[in-house]
Every structure is written in structure tokens, then in C-alpha cells.
Image: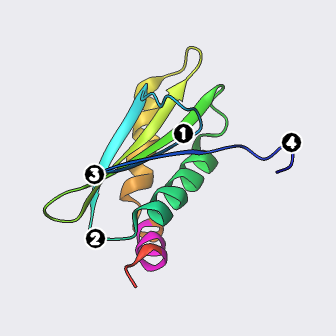
């Protein structure tokens, strides 16, 4: 692994998985959305990547995506830790807009569909 490659922590349990930049994930900001049954890790990775692109200017932002099984499919909690003073309501609105974006959702659904 190159020195610039970030390490991502994947924690799995019976309920689902958590993908985080740090070993101990923290949600200072978060938004949630429902999804049909999909492959959890690819979904988490794509959401993390798009969330990072949207919020990379937030100083000290460390993304976290938690995917949990529900009776209807999956529940995603996306957000993360923020080091420093930032407008949290604005960051949460950006995450919520990302999770509700039909173009992103369509790509995530295609890429993470069950085989």
C-alpha cells in the first residue's frame, strides 16, 4: 500500500456493516435513507466516495457509512466526524441531498444490486 493510500475500517456484525476512516467511527453529522436489498459493502463504498467528493472541503471531515438490514431492505446512515467548528446543519443538509439524489441513487442501485 502506498503511503498516500488511506486505510478504511470495515466492521461487520449481524445487523450490517460500518465503513469508516477511523477505527472508532463517530457521527458528528449524519443523514439516513432507505434502500432495497443490495450488496452492502459496494453500496457503502460508493456512498462514502460521493460523500467525500461533496464534503471534502470540510476541514477534518472523516466519513462514516453504516448499512443495516431492515425488513424492507437496507437503512444507510451516512455522515462522519468533523474536527473543528463548521455549520453542522449545512453539512447534514448536503449529506441528505446526496442520499436523496436520484442520479446517485440510480448508479448505486445498479452497481450494488444483488447478483
Quarter of the rendering containing residue 83: top right
Label 4 packing within 10 angstroms: few (<14), some (14-19), many (20+): few
Q: Residue at x 36, y 57 (%)?
A: 100
Query: What residue is pinned by disc 2?
Result: 37
Q: Position of residue 64 (x, y in %)?
A: 49, 40
Q: Position of residue 81 (x, y in %)?
A: 51, 27
Q: Secondary structure at mark 4?
A: loop
Lower sequence index among marks 2 and 4 = 4
Magenta span: 105-111
Residues at marks 1 and 3 touching, judged by CB atoms closer than 8 Å: no
Left or right: 105 with respect to 20?
Answer: left
Disc number placed over residue 3 in the picture, else none: 4
Q: Position of residue 53 (x, y in %)?
A: 63, 50
Left or right: 53 with respect to 24?
Answer: right
Q: Residue furthest left?
A: 71
Circle nearer the viewer, 1 or 2? 2
Amino acid at each position: 500500500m502506498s503511503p498516500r493510500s488511506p486505510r478504511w475500517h470495515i466492521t461487520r456484525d449481524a445487523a450490517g456493516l460500518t465503513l469508516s476512516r477511523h477505527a472508532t467511527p463517530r457521527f458528528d453529522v449524519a443523514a439516513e435513507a432507505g434502500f432495497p436489498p443490495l450488496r452492502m459493502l459496494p453500496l457503502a463504498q460508493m456512498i462514502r466516495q460521493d460523500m467525500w467528493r461533496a464534503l471534502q472541503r470540510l476541514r477534518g471531515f472523516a466519513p462514516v457509512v453504516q448499512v443495516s438490514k431492515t425488513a424492507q431492505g437496507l437503512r444507510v446512515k451516512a455522515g462522519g466526524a468533523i474536527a473543528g467548528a463548521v455549520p453542522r446543519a449545512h453539512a447534514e443538509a448536503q449529506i441528505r441531498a446526496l442520499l436523496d439524489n436520484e442520479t446517485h441513487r440510480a448508479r448505486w442501485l445498479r452497481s450494488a444490486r444483488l447478483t
